[in-house]
Image: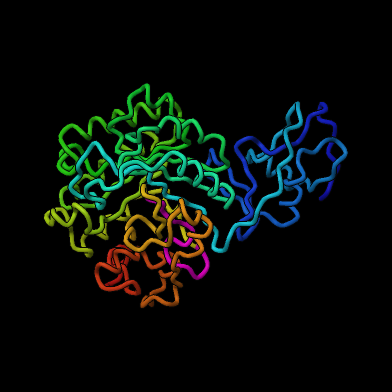
């Protein structure tokens, strides 16, 4: 039902400051604070592009009520600047960017796939350029990673820029350096902290005292009202910790728990006692909750909407494929590098079970390690009750 906006005390109907229009494969609006993507009809997208609206403008009442309920639009006293025309994203769209700003770290974790530092810090100029390009490409989530990103010599200069962009910023960290003062200064919408077991099993991989420092870091982040997610790797020493970890995370209000199995690369290759056979490790993926933010779509395998930029500017499918770059960000730019990334279709994989559309073939790097790029990911197979 279409109706005419009433006067509403002479206020303007506008997009809320944390919602941004995105011209993806399907026109959408993205809530960066709540990490919600809403797909729109062309008509609804066009209406939101015309905002701000005032009394006398016509609108579908059901659509307006929904947008008000979801916090996509609100009424404001002063007319904000009209949303500029939006450049359409490439297809497939680049929605998630792993920006590895440094490969330096304060820990020497036994299961780290990166190994020793080689490149150091990414130049601030390249970081700024990459964030600008990601914004123009209609990006949704910027994953600020490393190494330990807080060690970047100009981290706070990077931090101060983040709120100027229409994407969600997530800091990926080991948590040990997040004091109360650090937490107060953070401009990200989310922090993902790595916890690889309860105290003894976590410290066995990451060093004595690292668990308590990470937990204190989580407390400091939460005290500032910043959303916390957790990443946990399944290894030989934490198998008895998952029930306890799950209760702990639920109890303190962790929003998302990502559980995965480390690939045998970097330092992990030097510590075979850490790894588990896929038939055993896969059983523990069930413990994660609220994940799937970086899912693929259509006929694409995992990573269809994601790529990584490494500290030296290499752009690749993800950091595991560092030795197969699609280009250099400082020379060719993010858009061109994204267009040059090799893509696989689900129909090219040697997978034949009914879970394929759900798991998207799992991790292609893990499949490559076990057999080849077109093979099944045995960890995902066993996690879903199949024998590869």
Percent of width and height locating residue 346: 44, 72
Percent of width and height locating residue 343: 45, 68
Q: How many marks?
A: 0
Q: Can you name the residue that lies furthest to the left here?
A: 273
Q: Residue at x 57, y 49 (%)?
A: 37
Say if the magenta span includes residue 302: yes
The reply to whether residue 108 is visible in this rendering is yes
Percent of width and height locating residue 149: 35, 38
Q: Residue at x 22, y 43 (%)?
A: 197
Q: Is residue 178 left or right of residue 281?
A: right
- Looking at the magenta stretch, what is its main secondary structure? loop
The quarter of the image holding the C terminus is bottom left
Say if the magenta span includes residue 62: no
The quarter holding residue 78 reads top right
Percent of width and height locating residue 99: 42, 47
Q: Is residue 168 left or right of residue 254?
A: right
Q: Can you name the residue that lies furthest to the right here?
A: 56
The reply to whether residue 246 is visible in this rendering is no
Extent of the magenta region = 297-310
Q: Can you name the residue that lies furthest to the top here?
A: 181
Q: Is residue 144 left or right of residue 38?
A: left
Q: Residue at x 29, y 38 (%)?
A: 174
The quarter holding residue 83 reads top right
Q: Residue at x 22, y 47 (%)?
A: 116
The quarter holding residue 127 reads top left
> What colouring method underlies this structural image?
rainbow
Q: Is residue 79 above or below residue 167?
A: above
């Amino acid at each position: 039902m279409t109706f005419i906006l009433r006067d509403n005390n002479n206020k303007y109907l506008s997009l809320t400051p944390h919602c941004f229009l995105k011209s993806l494969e399907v026109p959408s609006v993205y809530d960066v604070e709540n990490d919600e993507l809403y797909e729109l009809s062309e008509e609804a997208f066009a209406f939101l592009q015309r905002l701000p609206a005032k009394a006398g403008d016509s609108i579908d009442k059901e659509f307006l009520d929904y947008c008000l309920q979801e916090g996509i639009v609100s009424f404001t006293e002063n007319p904000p600047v009209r949303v500029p025309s939006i450049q359409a994203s490439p297809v497939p769209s680049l929605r998630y960017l792993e920006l590895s700003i440094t490969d330096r770290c304060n820990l020497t974790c036994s299961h780290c796939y990166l190994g020793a530092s080689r490149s150091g810090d990414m130049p601030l100029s390249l970081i700024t350029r990459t964030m600008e390009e990601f914004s123009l490409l209609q990006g949704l989530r910027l994953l600020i990673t490393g190494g330990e990103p807080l060690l970047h010599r100009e981290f706070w200069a990077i931090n101060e820029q983040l709120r100027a962009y229409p994407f969600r910023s997530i800091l990926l960290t080991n948590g040990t350096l997040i004091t109360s003062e650090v937490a107060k200064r953070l401009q990200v919408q989310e922090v993902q902290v790595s916890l690889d077991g309860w105290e003894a099993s976590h410290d066995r991989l990451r060093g004595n005292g690292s668990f308590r420092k990470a937990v204190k870091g989580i407390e400091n982040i939460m005290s500032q009202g910043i959303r916390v997610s957790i990443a946990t790797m399944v290894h030989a020493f934490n198998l008895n910790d998952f029930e306890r970890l799950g209760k702990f995370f639920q109890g303190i209000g962790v929003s998302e728990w990502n559980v995965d199995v480390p690939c045998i690369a970097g330092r992990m290759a030097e510590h075979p006692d850490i790894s588990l056979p896929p038939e055993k490790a896969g059983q523990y993926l069930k413990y994660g909750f609220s994940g799937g933010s970086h899912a693929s779509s259509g006929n694409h395998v995992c990573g269809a909407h994601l790529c990584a930029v490494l500290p030296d500017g290499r752009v690749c499918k993800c950091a595991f494929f560092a030795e197969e770059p699609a280009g250099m960000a400082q020379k060719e730019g993010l858009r061109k590098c994204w267009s040059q990334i090799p893509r696989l279709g689900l129909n090219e994989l040697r997978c034949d079970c009914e879970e394929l559309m759900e798991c998207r073939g799992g991790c292609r790097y893990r499949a490559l390690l076990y057999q080849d790029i077109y093979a099944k990911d045995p960890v995902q197979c066993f996690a879903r009750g199949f024998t590869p």
